[in-house]
DNA sequence: ACTTTTTATGAATACGTAACCATTTTTACC
DNA sequence: GGTAAAAATGGTTACGTATTCATAAAAAGT
């Protein structure tokens, strides 16, 4: 591999000068500049970012631990994160992790001495939180939140759950089901609590046969759906804990020959980009602002990295209903 | 930052021994092993991958230059690539590039001395091809192909275009439009040629007002769509150069109050995962095998990296029509 | 018991860069 | 023209690891 020393020799200068040509060219005389640049070009020299990071103790790399892209929420956030980071001169190491691979994912990020981390799937009481703080690695969680209640960007999940139920109630629905994710995940937990509160406020029952807090795999959602529609008094509407779940349910409904919203109303949470598509037109609850959570997360993270600001990030975006075509009056 | 030297000092051994504990523990006596591991744990030591890569001349990193995720094709491939690479112990540096940012993207990958690259958007006569070969960096292109016709995985694009037209013809369509991407992109070019061949074989005209080879931005597709449906004899069907285009057209159709497939048939190419969704049910042409192009690309790339095999990769997957619900007899 | 192997450890070095300090060259000023 | 200041360049080192080579300790063979 051709190094700055090779360039130096070829140009008849010191390695130091080569380094200067690249980093502080204003300190180098024009003739020297020219011959070094000529040598760089001739030898096809490309500086080694790893060597640089070693001496500067800065990698310009960010680790993104995202959920899987078959969940469109992560499509939107990953796009926003990678693009903004690249714009700011950072590379992004992406991993799509499931909860059971978290340890390896953390280890990989640590070995690469990343400048910061964005975590979509931190566990509620994950010791990683303490470890990251102690190791002084800037990080932001999105999508999920840690028990310590710091360094996160989120939407107002309780309110989102509340609004989703309220929306159905205002459309006259009485038998409203809930299909959400595991309650060990803070996000789903709060959304569910919001849902329950709305049901309570409007004196509607929210109990056993209508409530599923299940795993978010395709099979588990479909299973919940099939249980629900085979109830004697099947629900007229379902509040889904996330758009990905709602989309899954819509697919299931079609398989079951149920028309949406005529036979069944469905509302999601997240307002993912694709929910706008004409064929989907998913009614959903999402952030009032146009900026997605991934964007907020990476913006704050880079701010933390560069300004070393320690003020703890806690961002909760307000939400509203995006009324599209998957819900209907009964 | 705590280094292996710190661990060595703390454990009362040499740095060499610490290195051995991590890489070749079978060469270290048990008592030594124990005390070094204890020190590692106590000091919270994590080896520095950059320092290692410097001396080993291997980064265990792959650069992925992907198209944007709002194109679902890249959702599928990115997932496959990142997951497989991680499984094999590689980190993936992802960039979502547009053609005009290619140079910067290449530069970033070079600086990081990645072990290999996966390129989705190589230009037909991009000099990068020669440069990569000359720099001896293993690489694979997918989605697009270089003029040199080497190191690619693709579907049979000509056949895909051919089958998409043939499908419409067999359904009795006479006025069949084409909306594809720029012909400077090999993929679109071959798909278009296939389309033309089918039209010719069946004695149907394929000419001016029905043909759009446009930019793939949402606006440009929509513009093409609006031109098409306002023709005096508007087409009864559209062959789209890619599923992303087809999905765009479907959205446009709904906006224009045209029912699919009743008022207009649409077929795509790629068979992206989401096209299966019950609400989309996009008829499309895609690879016969279940493995997506991203998977093929990363598998071949890692093979190249690890086995240094030089046999040039040229993989062309056969295609077939996936008949769903966006096309109909006239 | 003494040599020969084998096993276990350590010292020194290289990887490619930026940073620090020292030195030389140029410019400015009187 | 001589000195002081400024500008330009070079020598050396550190970053954290794996590797090569050398040495010490233990085991095996006679």
Image: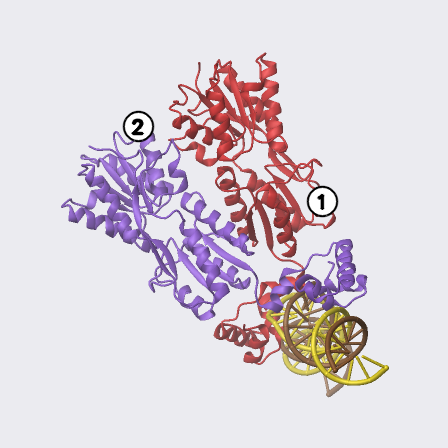
Chain colours: A purple, B red, C brown, D yellow
Q: Quadrant of the N terminus of chain A?
A: bottom right
Rendering coords of residue B321 (x, y %)? 51, 25
Q: Quadrant of the C terminus of chain A?
A: top left
Rendering coords of residue B101 (x, y %)? 60, 46
Q: Nearer the viewer, residue B296 or B23?
A: B296
Question: Where is A6 relative to B166, above or below?
Answer: below
Q: Nearer the viewer, mark 2 or mark 1?
A: 2
Image quarter of residue B197: top right
Question: Where is B280 relative to C14, above or below?
Answer: above
Rendering coords of residue A8 (x, y %)? 77, 64
Q: Nearer the viewer, residue A321 or B277?
A: A321
Please say whether residue B291 is visible from this viewpoint. yes
> Residue tagged by mark 2?
A257
> Residue tagged by mark 1?
B310
Please say whether residue B299 is visible from this viewpoint. no
Mark 1 crowd level (few <14, some 14–19, many ≥20, 10 Å Cα): few
Query: What residue do we see at 31% from left, 35% from top?
Result: A324
């Amino acid at each position: 591999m051709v190094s700055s020393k090779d360039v130096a020799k070829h140009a008849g200068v010191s390695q130091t000068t080569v380094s200067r040509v690249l980093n502080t060219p204003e300190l180098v005389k024009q003739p020297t500049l020219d011959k070094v640049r000529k040598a760089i070009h001739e030898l096809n020299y490309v500086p080694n970012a790893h060597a640089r990071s070693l001496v500067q103790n800065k990698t310009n790399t960010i680790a993104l631990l995202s959920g899987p892209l078959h969940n469109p929420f992560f499509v939107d956030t990953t796009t926003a994160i990678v693009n903004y980071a690249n714009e700011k001169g950072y590379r992004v190491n992406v991993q799509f992790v499931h909860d059971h691979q978290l340890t390896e994912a953390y280890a990989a990020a640590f070995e690469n001495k990343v400048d910061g981390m964005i975590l979509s799937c931190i566990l509620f009481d994950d010791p990683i939180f303490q470890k990251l703080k102690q190791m002084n690695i800037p990080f932001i969680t999105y999508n999920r939140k840690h028990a310590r209640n710091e360094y996160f960007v989120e939407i107002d999940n309780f309110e989102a759950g509340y609004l989703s139920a309220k929306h159905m109630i205002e459309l006259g629905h009485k038998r409203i089901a809930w299909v959400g994710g595991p309650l060990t995940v803070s996000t789903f937990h709060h959304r569910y609590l919001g849902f329950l509160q709305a049901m309570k406020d409007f004196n509607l029952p929210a109990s056993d046969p209508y409530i599923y807090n299940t795993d978010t795999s395709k099979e588990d959602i479909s299973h919940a759906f099939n249980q629900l529609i085979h109830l004697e008094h099947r629900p007229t509407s379902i509040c889904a804990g996330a758009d990905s779940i709602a989309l899954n349910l819509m697919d299931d409904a079609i398989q079951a020959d149920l028309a949406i919203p005529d036979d069944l109303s469905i509302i999601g949470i997240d307002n993912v980009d694709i929910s706008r598509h004409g064929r989907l037109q998913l009614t959903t609850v999402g952030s009032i602002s146009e900026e997605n959570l991934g964007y907020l997360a990476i913006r704050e993270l880079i701010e933390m990295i560069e300004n070393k600001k320690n003020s703890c990030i806690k961002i909760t975006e307000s939400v509203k209903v995006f009324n599209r075509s998957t819900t209907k009056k009964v």
